[in-house]
Image: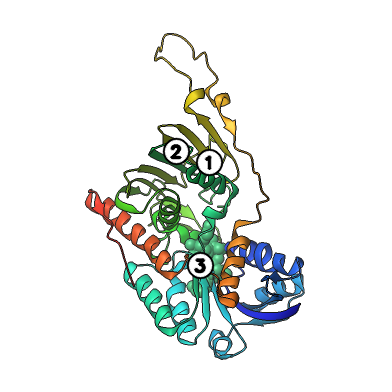
Amino acid sequence: MTRKTVRIAMNGVTGRMGYRQHLVRSILALREQGGLDLGDGTVLWPEPILLGRREHALRQIADRHGLAHVSTDVDAVLADPTVDVYFDAQVTSAREGSLRKAIAAGKHVYTEKPTATGLDGALELARLAHGRGVRHGVVQDKIFLPGLIKLKRLVDGGFFGRILSVRGEFGYWVFEGDWQSAQRPSWNYRAEDGGGIVVDMFPHWEYVLHELFGRVKSVQALATTHVPQRWDERGKPYDATADDAAYGIFELEGGVIAQINSSWTVRVNRDELVEFQVDGTEGSAVAGLRKCRAQHRGATPKPVWNPDVPATEAFREQWQEVPDNAHFDNGFKAQWELFLSHVHADTPYRWDLLAGARGVQLAELGLKSSAEGRRIDVPEITL
Ligand SMILES: NC(=O)c1ccc[n+]([C@@H]2O[C@H](COP(=O)([O-])OP(=O)(O)OC[C@H]3O[C@@H](n4cnc5c(N)ncnc54)[C@H](O)[C@@H]3O)[C@@H](O)[C@H]2O)c1
């Protein structure tokens, strides 16, 4: 077995996603398992370089995990020929510029979504990476979740017959920050800092719908700011200028209609923080992050509308758990493994900057639809 070190510059590792999901649960987890076995006699050994603006915060993380390399000098790290991959989990507004630099420096790039704050920028990144000949990938973690893997299995196995509709419910209450601290960063609620639930969540909905049911052909959305004032990390009040809820309808290629509510201003009365119900002629299913329950046509009850009598059936108990039938690893890690294999073993990989640009496009058109109060076509984009 040959061990090959892959040096990954990780920018934004002091943040929620960068630290927990990408550094700890993906890269460090890969090291704990002895590296990534490429299956050709090579094991990739990821060597992170923690990149950011605050050296003490980076050093603290490095010390906690026994890591050797930290830097606050992005340019110097990008100029280092031993660095293979640049990864970005910074605040959204800082992403585009950093990715451009990394691509220009000839690094393979892997990034959180959204890849840019507008479609033009996102497409330009895809074109630049293509032109420079570097490998590129965008985090599309939701399709690597157990619940959605099981849902996809049902789709691929023909369980649903003709799929009619998808309804998604995503959200939870994000505290305003005054009497209880907010559980999300304050920039999420400021449009001028790249915040907003449409920009945050529509990129996810684009690839979830696309991968499972068909490309999004049109969008009609109503985005709003239900809670106009919040308190930041220092307890200072600020105006929430970004949308905190969005109600969207998506028409998909192949005729499926999807409707997804996204909200940081809703209390959870569901089994999971996101759930998708899929209804088809032969059966239906409800998938969350981890679970998936199904109901076949032959086991469908026949409720009769009668408000005069209490409900006699326990509807939620009439669904059958879809078994795992497999071991599911952390979704972020699973996608990292596919990306690193793509870079080093040339395996196919479709979740690239063009796919990321589709997500940015859907967010942009969703906001436009909301502002103009009309349904908008989503044209197919190409390099
Ligand atoms: N894939 C997912 O499910 C998912 C979930 C949440 C967030 N995200 C994305 O991940 C990114 C980070 O989100 P987060 O919730 O971790 O945010 P966060 O605020 O916790 O972390 C942001 C990181 O960027 C750095 N940063 C802050 N301001 C900066 C600036 N002006 N310039 C450069 N760097 C700056 C911070 O130091 C920190 O390391 C966002 O783009 C977001 O859209 C993805």
Q: What x and y, as percent, mark residue 92?
A: 46, 67
Q: Is residue 224 left or right of residue 60?
A: left
Marks 1 & 2, CB-CB < 8 Å contact: yes
Instruction: Inspect the image, locate mark 2, and give the three-letter code of the amino acid beneath it.
Output: Val
- The residue at which mark 3 appears reads as 349
Quick one: 206 or 226, which is closer to the camera? 206
- The residue at which mark 1 appears reads as 287
Instruction: Inspect the image, locate mark 3, and give the three-letter code of the amino acid beneath it.
Output: Tyr
Instruction: Inspect the image, locate mark 1, and give the three-letter code of the amino acid beneath it.
Output: Ala
Callout 2 secondary element = strand
Quick one: 379 or 157, which is closer to the camera? 157
Q: How many marks?
A: 3
Q: Is residue 135 left or right of residue 119?
A: right
Quarter placement of the C terminus: bottom left
Q: What x and y, as percent, mark residue 53?
A: 57, 78
Quarter placement of the N terminus: bottom right
Q: What x and y, as percent, mark residue 332?
A: 59, 60
Q: Is residue 88 left or right of residue 239?
A: right
The part of the image, by quadrant, that contains residue 3 is bottom right
Q: Is residue 34 visible?
A: yes
Residue at horizontal 36 percent and vertical 58 percent from the top = 363
Q: Nearer the viewer, mark 3 or mark 1?
A: 3
Residue at horizontal 77 percent and vertical 74 percent from the top = 66
Label 1 crowd bin: few (<14), some (14–19), many (20+), radius 10 Å:
many
Q: What x and y, as percent, mark residue 51?
A: 60, 78
Within 8 Å of ligand 1, the CB of disc 3? no
Callout 3 secondary element = loop
- The earlier-in-sequence mark between 3 and 2 is 2
